[in-house]
Image (cartoon, rainbow, N blue to C red):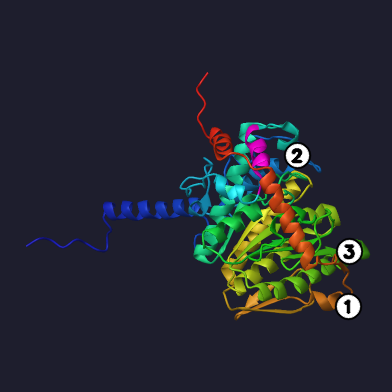
């Protein structure tokens, strides 16, 4: 009969096994930080910036592309996501998910004219290809635009599928119009993504919430008359966009009426809280696309604390109402360190909301501390910004278009598409050439 092992003295094999599995757990914690908490999935491709490297400070078309890699690196360095939640080609992320392909040509043609798209694909005519303000054009830059919108689409599709919050670390490019770029914006990804999801039957109604400091004029021009897409733009600086219509809600905040500091912050937050809940309830979108602009910081003197709780409020609204949401980067022109802190603040707020807020939770406005929010027993407590302003709110809303004016606007847009239409082979060839491997020299 065999001898039973002495259980009081662990064998060397058992000791080494325990040590090995302990190391695995520690290592897993290093490469999968915070896996216990639900966090957003994020899309980013190293090709988004198109190889652009320029001044990281100032109101420049180079600022947006240049800040993207810095923001991504900070998110990863600070362990705000774990590898399986990052859809990227970046070698920084071991165990990463697959990156997104570039956006398809048909989706682009639904929003922009063929003549404009061909200029973006080929660089000719140069003035049209660089109408957004870039001083140069090349194929890497053009591919970056398409990869950016492709990532945006995949993020939005995933948000719908999983009924959650996702992010694309590219831009929505809300100033891009039907047939040209404008103010650093090239392809209106907000509208391209919304239209494709609707065309594919994945969503019936999409709402764009634009909290950039500058009016989303390009988005408005692209969607007026599209009854399945709504644009809500709460801004400080007018860009000469169309007036309000049934599906274009524009509100200009009069920041200058309030002293920079807590009073201006509270007024801005009160305006956001007054407008958004009612519009979301009324339109009942299947998906929200959120332009998380950071330029109210450098453009209007809104504090970083106010922008952080603004983002938390938007995310809490979408989560409590069970509305999937995808957010993208938007304006911000401070120094790169400040921009990184501001944009990573959006990531932190989305993670916090996903971890604490559930569909069906109730939002209440009771607190008196303007930058503090909390969740307890299904109640999300935000400050009572309305009472803190003592009823003083300064908003300018442009007059609405009449039904006849809306019809004329849509007809004019349709004529533009017809006038700038190219042969299918012509535009398809220009698109495909961007992705044909070049022979080695």
| Percent coordinates x, y for residue 10 in the rendering | 28, 58
Mark 3 → mark 2, Cα distance in angstroms = 30 Å
Magenta-drawn stretch, dominant element (helix, strand or loop): helix
Check residue 390 in the rendering and tell me which mark sits there, or answer none. 1
* Label 1 crowd bin: few (<14), some (14–19), many (20+), radius 10 Å: few
Question: Are the residues flagged by discs 3 and 2 in contact, CB closer than 8 Å?
Answer: no
Element type where label 3 sits in the image: loop
Quick one: label 2 or label 1, which is nearer the N terminus? 2
Residue 138 x %, y %:
65, 31
Q: Residue 212's spot in the image, x, y percent? A: 76, 56
Identify the mark nearer the N-term, 1 or 3.
3
- What is the number of the mark on residue 254? 3
Q: Which residue is mark 2?
A: 131
**Residue 35 spot, x, y in % from top left:** 50, 60
Seen in the image, is 25 located left or right of residue 149? Answer: left
In the image, which residues are magenta?
112-122
Judge from the rendering whether residue 25 lies leftward or rightward of residue 2; answer left or right.
Answer: right
**Structural distance between the alpha carbons of marks 2 and 1:** 44 Å
Front: mark 2 or 1: 2
Q: Nearer the viewer, residue 375 or 185?
A: 185
Mark 3 / mark 2, whichever is N-terminal: 2
Select label 3 or label 2 by which is in front: 2
Tell which of 179 and 268 is nearer to you. Answer: 179
């Amino acid at each position: 009969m065999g001898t039973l092992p002495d259980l009081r003295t662990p064998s060397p094999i058992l000791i080494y096994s325990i040590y090995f599995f302990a190391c695995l757990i520690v290592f897993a914690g290093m490469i999968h930080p915070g896996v216990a908490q639900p966090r957003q999935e994020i899309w980013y491709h190293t090709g988004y910036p198109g190889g652009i490297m320029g001044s990281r400070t100032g109101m420049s078309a180079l600022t947006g592309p240049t800040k993207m890699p810095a923001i991504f690196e900070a998110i990863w360095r600070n362990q705000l996501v774990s590898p399986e939640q990052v859809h990227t080609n970046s070698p920084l992320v071991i165990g990463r998910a697959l990156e997104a392909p570039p956006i398809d040509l048909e989706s682009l043609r639904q929003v922009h004219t063929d003549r404009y798209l061909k200029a973006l694909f080929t660089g000719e005519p140069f003035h049209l290809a660089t109408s957004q303000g870039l001083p140069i054009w090349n194929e890497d830059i053009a591919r970056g635009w398409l990869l950016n919108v492709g990532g945006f689409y995949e993020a939005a599709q995933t948000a719908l599928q999983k009924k959650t919050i996702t992010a694309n670390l590219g831009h929505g490019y809300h100033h891009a119009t039907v047939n040209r770029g404008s103010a650093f914006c090239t392809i209106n990804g907000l509208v391209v993504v919304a239209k494709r999801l609707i065309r594919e039957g994945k969503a019936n109604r999409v709402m764009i919430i634009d909290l950039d400091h500058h009016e989303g004029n390009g988005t408005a021009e692209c969607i007026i008359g599209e009854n399945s897409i709504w644009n809500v733009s709460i801004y400080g600086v007018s860009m000469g966009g169309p007036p309000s219509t049934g599906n274009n809600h524009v509100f200009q905040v009069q920041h200058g009426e309030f002293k920079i500091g807590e009073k201006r912050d509270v007024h801005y937050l009160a305006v956001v809280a007054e407008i958004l809940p009612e519009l979301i309830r009324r339109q009942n979108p299947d998906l929200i696309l959120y332009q998380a602009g950071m330029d109210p910081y450098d453009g209007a003197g809104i504090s970083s604390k106010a922008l952080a709780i603004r983002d938390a409020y938007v995310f809490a609204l979408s989560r409590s109402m069970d509305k999937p949401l995808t957010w993208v980067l938007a304006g911000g022109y401070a120094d790169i360190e400040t921009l990184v802190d501001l944009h990573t603040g959006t990531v932190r707020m989305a993670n916090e909301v996903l971890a604490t807020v559930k569909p069906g939770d109730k939002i209440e406005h009771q607190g008196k501390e303007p930058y503090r929010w909390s969740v307890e027993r299904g109640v999300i407590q935000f400050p009572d910004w309305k009472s803190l302003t003592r009823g003083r709110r300064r908003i300018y809303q442009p007059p609405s278009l009449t039904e006849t004016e809306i019809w004329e606007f849509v007809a004019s847009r349709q004529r533009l598409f017809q006038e700038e239409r190219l042969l299918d082979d012509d535009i398809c060839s220009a698109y495909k050439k961007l992705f044909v491997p070049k022979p080695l020299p």
